[in-house]
Amino acid sequence: MRMYDLITAKKNGREHTREELEFIVNGFVNGSVPDYQMSAWMMAVCLKGMTDQETAILTDVMAHSGDMVDLSPIQGIKVDKHSTGGVGDKTTLVITPIVAACGVKIAKMSGRGLGHTGGTVDKMESVPGTRTALDQEEFFAQVNKIGISVIGQSGHLAVADKKMYALRDVTATVDCIPLIASSIMSKKLAAGSDAILLDVTCGNGAFMKTVDQAIELAQKMVAIGTHNGRNVAALITDMDTPLGHNIGNSLEVMESMEVLKGRGPADLTEVCYQLAVNMLLLAGLGTEEECRAMAEKAVADGSAFEKCKQMFAAQGGDISVLEDYSRFASARYSREILAEETGYIYSHDTEKIGSASVLLGAGRLTKTDEIDFAAGITLHKKTGDYVEKGQSIATFYADDEALFDSAEKMFKSGLVIKGEKPVEAPLVYARVTKNGVERFY
């Protein structure tokens, strides 16, 4: 078998066999397939596509290129959740304690932020003392004891994906749906949960810009999971506007705790409830109405917030900051961002808002950059809100005043104020399961 022939086969649109995909992926991991041939093959995939079965096999091969986590020592059904990323997307910090408080085991591996999107692990580490690197024995013991643990992804999971993504990033193959789907799902299959809920974001702050693109990606990932024996569903959620009001690590933790205390912003609260309900559905805990009632009760009676505190405490976190936000480290400087005209915020490019927070120090431009946990943005006005000229739209936080000008320029470059109010977008556009697509708009 020669890589040259396999590149030619995909260039001509032929479907690969498992043996061929194992040759390609494992050869790339062990070095027998060089970067330039893998790049050519991935570009052929972008141009010619893959069948659902072919993508499912590719994903399984990628998953088995590293460690496969066996969660069987954890009693009960384990449900995982993955978001394709966004700005102000702190839902994991809310929904995992809700679901755990309802009796479903959460043994979750999350990632760090890169570019304009934030990462759950970074947000958790803004709580002083929190450890996100646990060995397997401690990880399992914690989930068995309190029902929940969220940790950083192991570097040995889906080794092929790490190498393939680094190559995709520099060969214009990042936006290829079969490669996106196999990248995400290879890590989820390797992580070992019984069921997986996917939060596929769409809009100007997401990788998928349109609802149709997001549905296509969701269908591919659901098909992968189903083929590989997992119970998978996906929600298509809006990312044309940041979720909630806070962007930045400790700022987002504070807002997440507000949702768990029953007083969070309406948009973030509703999206979190819908995600939590669908995780409970995957776990088989009842009808949609019964699962909604369970989730709302977990917030109302304080058990979800208590579960969150138990998780942080078990992982070394100072949970006093979750009760008293003034105990978080605060930024040295702040700046109010004022509206330059009167009218409705007609649109505000969410990716530019996220990029502005990165410029303030809340995110990374490269994987080695240090994060300022206190840096970020609080939005006072969002898309659809009316503003007067000179009114504060947002507050910026940073430890260096020199960062404000470039961040403000980035923030305002995506802001459009008009006399007319924009049409309100739904928070959740659709649900995708193995049985099809259910649209909500």
Image (cartoon, rainbow, N blue to C red):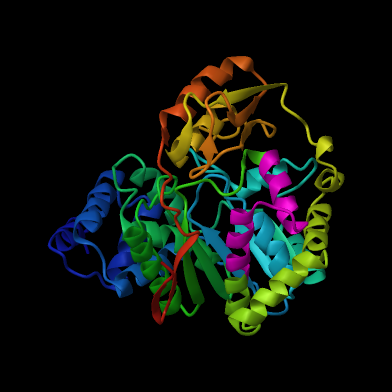
Residue 396, image x, y percentages: 62, 28
Residue 58: name its quadrant: bottom left
Q: Would residue 305 be counted in the magenta stretch?
A: no
Residue 162, compared with residue 68, is above or below; it is above
Which quarter of the rendering shows the N terminus?
Answer: bottom left
Nearer the observer, 316 or 3: 316
Residue 23 is left or right of residue 422, and the answer is left
Nearer the observer, 146 or 60: 146
For the record, the magenta segment spans: 250-276
Residue with the most extreme top position: 402
Residue 23 is left or right of residue 269, and the answer is left
Residue 168, compared with residue 418, is above or below; it is below
Which quarter of the rendering shows the C terminus?
Answer: bottom left
Q: Residue at x 24, y 49 (%)?
A: 37
Residue 39, compared with residue 416, is above or below; it is below
Residue 307 is left or right of residue 111, and the answer is right
Q: Is residue 283 visible?
A: no
Q: Is residue 127 visible?
A: yes
Residue 284, image x, y percentages: 62, 83
Q: Taken as a whole, is the magenta stretch helix, strand or loop?
A: helix
Q: Residue at x 23, y 62 (%)?
A: 49
Q: Residue at x 31, y 63 (%)?
A: 23
Residue 78: name its quadrant: bottom right
Nearer the observer, 236 or 361: 236
Residue 63, compared with residue 245, is above or below; it is below
Residue 84, image x, y percentages: 48, 55
Q: Residue at x 51, y 30 (%)?
A: 356
Residue 54, image x, y percentages: 30, 71
Residue 41: name its quadrant: bottom left
Q: How many marks?
A: 0
Residue with the most extreme right position: 320
